[in-house]
Image (tube, rainbow, N blue to C red):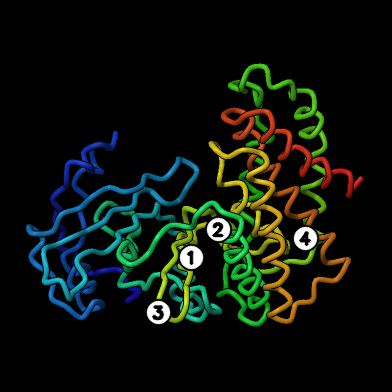
């Protein structure tokens, strides 16, 4: 399953109208290997139709800083009892380092996550004719729903993340560079000039933001002394799908592009703060409180006792990661109460290290 195809036979897939919405001309009709399609069919246990009968729909485009270039849904007409689509994730390929998501699938760790978590099955991978890296994944669109922005849902998701973080010390990641990409990117953003450009007018918070940014280096340095575990690092509601069965509820965790080593507690940052921009401050606080309750319970269930020292470290990691990663974006699009709440979390973390 993990090979670069030696004799590629490029084929062009037929775009739907939605795929044509992309600004990039090459996104309309992605070119893939015919042998890769055959491999995907084998993974599904079915014979895929000829490439000319497959259609593709562009469902996501990655940001410039993201290694994910585009995500497509590849579909075909089949009997109701068979799968009718797969996900094609196209990743910017760098020969010096394999994509982290691909490395995680190769390691087998994603197939051994603690219940109720699971990841989509990987059906194949290859370097495609354009030089990017393709991951072919199980399509979970049927039979799943998104994570609702409700406190109880956040508690359940955070409980599962606590189980996951506590399990990683006993399941080391594969060899490679697993540094904290989230903080590395945040440090680049914070070091740029013109951070106040585009802030919502009348927020009245510019002086506090400037003071926090002046001290952000202290927070970034403090991360090196905190207890570290292996984390997903992008467990936003967009990357969590809920599958309800007759006897249990399972959570699918998608998009492992930035997974890596990070301080305990940082995992909650994306879960809580990726819910804006239309959320209210009090709504975020409610979800935040339940997320912490669930996360601590998950750690404890997995045998990682949340001692006083550990709790303090987790709060520091959460507040610092939330503020340095999300503050500048929140300041541009959100209302003052949400900016104030995020600033308070960052200021609390800053006070703890000074």
Element at label 1: strand
Q: Mark 2 Cα within 10 Å, few/some/many (few <14, many 20+)?
A: many
Residue sitting farthest toward the top: 202
Q: Which residue is mark 4?
A: 314
Residue 126 percent across, percent down from the top left: 31, 66
Q: Which-is-in-front pick, marks 3 and 1?
A: 3
Q: Position of residue 49 (x, y in %)?
A: 9, 67
> Which quadrant is home to the C terminus?
top right
> In the rendered view, would you say 203 is above or below 222?
above
**Along the line of sight, which residue is nearer the eye, 338 or 67?**
338
Quarter of the image with the N terminus in it: bottom left
> Label 3's element?
loop
Q: Earlier in the sequence, mark 2 or mark 3?
A: 2
Of mark 1 and mark 2, the one earlier in the sequence is 2
Residue appearing at x 56%, y 54% in the figure: 150
Horizontally, residue 280 falls left or right of residue 238, namely right
Tag 1 and tag 2, C-beta contact below 8 Å: yes
Q: Which mark is residue 253?
A: 1
């Amino acid at each position: 399953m993990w090979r670069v195809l030696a004799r590629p036979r490029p084929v062009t897939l037929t775009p739907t109208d939605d795929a044509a919405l992309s600004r990039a001309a090459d996104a309309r009709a992605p070119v893939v290997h015919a042998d890769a399609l055959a491999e995907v069919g084998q993974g599904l246990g079915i014979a895929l139709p000829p490439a000319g009968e497959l259609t593709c729909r562009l469902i996501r485009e990655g940001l410039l800083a993201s290694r994910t270039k585009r995500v497509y849904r590849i579909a075909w007409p089949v009997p109701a009892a068979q799968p009718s689509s797969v996900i094609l994730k196209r990743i910017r390929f760098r020969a010096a380092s394999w994509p982290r998501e691909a490395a995680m699938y190769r390691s087998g760790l994603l197939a051994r996550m603690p219940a109720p978590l699971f990841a989509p099955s990987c059906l194949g991978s290859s370097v495609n004719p354009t030089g990017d890296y393709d991951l072919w994944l199980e399509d979970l669109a049927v039979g799943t729903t998104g994570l609702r922005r409700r406190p109880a849902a956040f508690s359940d998701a955070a409980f599962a993340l606590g189980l996951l973080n506590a399990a990683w010390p006993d399941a080391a990641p594969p060899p490679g560079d697993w540094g904290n990409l989230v903080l590395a990117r945040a440090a680049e953003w914070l070091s740029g000039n013109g951070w106040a450009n585009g802030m919502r007018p009348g927020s009245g918070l510019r002086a506090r933001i400037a003071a926090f940014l002046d001290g952000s280096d202290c927070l970034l340095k403090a991360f090196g002394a905190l207890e570290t575990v292996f984390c997903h690092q992008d467990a936003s509601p967009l990357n969590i799908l809920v599958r309800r069965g007759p006897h249990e509820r399972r959570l699918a965790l998608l998009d492992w592009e930035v997974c890596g080593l990070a301080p305990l507690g940082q995992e909650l940052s994306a879960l809580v703060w990726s819910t804006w921009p239309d959320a209210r401050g009090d709504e975020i606080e409610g979800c935040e409180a339940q997320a912490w309750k669930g996360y601590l319970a998950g750690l404890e269930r997995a045998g990682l006792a949340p001692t006083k020292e550990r709790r303090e470290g987790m709060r520091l990691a959460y507040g610092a990661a939330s503020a340095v990663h999300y503050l500048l974006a929140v300041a541009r699009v959100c209302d003052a109460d949400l900016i104030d709440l995020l600033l308070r979390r960052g200021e609390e973390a800053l006070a703890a290290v000074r």
